[in-house]
Amino acid sequence: MQKPLYDLIIIGASAVGTGAGIYAARRKLNFFIISENIGGEVASSGEIGNWPGIIETNGIELADQFKKHLDSYGVEIKEGWRVEKIEPIKNYHIVHAKRGNEIAQFETKTVIVGSGIHPRHLGVPGEEEHYGKGITYCTVCDGPLYKNKTTVTIGGGNSALESALMMVDIAKKVYVLNLNAAFRGEQILIDKLTQKDNVEIIFEAKTKEIVGEGLVSGVKYDDKNGQEHMLDVQGVMIHIGMVPNSDLVDVKKNDFKEIIVDAKCATSVPGIFAAGDVTNIPYKQIAIAAGQGVTAALAAIEYINRWSAV
């Protein structure tokens, strides 16, 4: 059998990819990182105050630091590629990828899946039609478009709180619709938001429809008593959770489509490792994802050291 070309392929160029890439480079592995973009969901984050060593930054700046760190080691990043499938072949793997009309296959001894997550959709009438016409799942990306307008952030976790905090400094008025009776995010973010004068928080609100002709003009919701209300808004920021990007690999997953890994980030398939938010780790945090990337890289190195071509 022909020996696979690469020692390792890392899928995803965010916290996992950076942590894994640094350690793979330091061990001088024959590897590269492949990703549709650099930074992933990290680049879409707002204020970041829990990255060790940096008191305050934001997602775009942190993603830029990730890239600079990888560049300092000369790590190759194949950007713009979407991995479609990982195919196990005996004791190596074929990574199938696509960029536009271009198709490629890469052979490797090991793979680290750090493909992360993507935003969950509401699934209500008007959502699909108004995407990009007043609806966004990335407040950092699109929030500045709504300067001095009225917006609503839908959700109750940290990403929703960060969205609303960003918008209170941009929009004239900010509503927050939370399906639950309380926020689920960090108390420091809740405290900051509740001190703002131009925000109105509505708990136990179930979003029913996003309305508008061409552009968004309002959001319908039911209160806790089932009574329907309408908010007149020009922007809708949806932050209701994330879905793992795990369809590219056939390994054991839980009911949430999260890849099941052990303490060394190994999956149910030898040679395939996974790390970060795409896995069943209990806490989805940037610092944890970076650490898991390091763990996965060291585990992959251990596997490579024992790898045999026969």
Image (cartoon, rainbow, N blue to C red):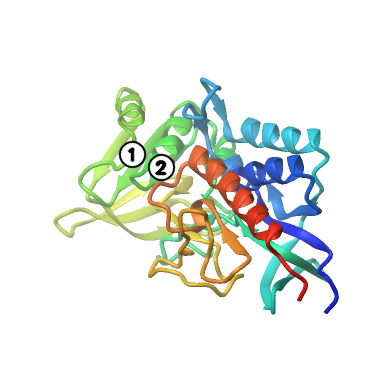
Q: Which residue is mark 1?
A: 185
Q: Which residue is mark 2?
A: 160
Q: Are marks 2 and 1 in contact (CB under 8 Å)?
A: yes
Answer with mark 2 or mark 1, whichever residue precedes in sequence: 2
Mark 2 falls on what kind of element? helix
Residue 103 seen anywhere in this rendered image of the structure: no
Q: Is residue 174 above or below residue 78?
A: above
Q: In front: 7, or 216?
A: 7
For the point 40% across and 68% down, the residue is 254
Tell which tag, 2 or 1, sits nearer the viewer: 1
Q: Quadrant of residue 173?
A: top left
Q: In front: 49, or 239?
A: 49
Q: Amino acid at mark 2?
A: Ala
For the point 38% across and 51% down, the residue is 282
Residue 293, position as x, y percentages in the image: 59, 47
Determine whether, in the image, residue 230 is placed left or right of residue 226. Answer: right
> What's the distance in space between the residues labelled 2 and 1, CA to CA?
8 Å
Mark 1 falls on what kind of element? loop
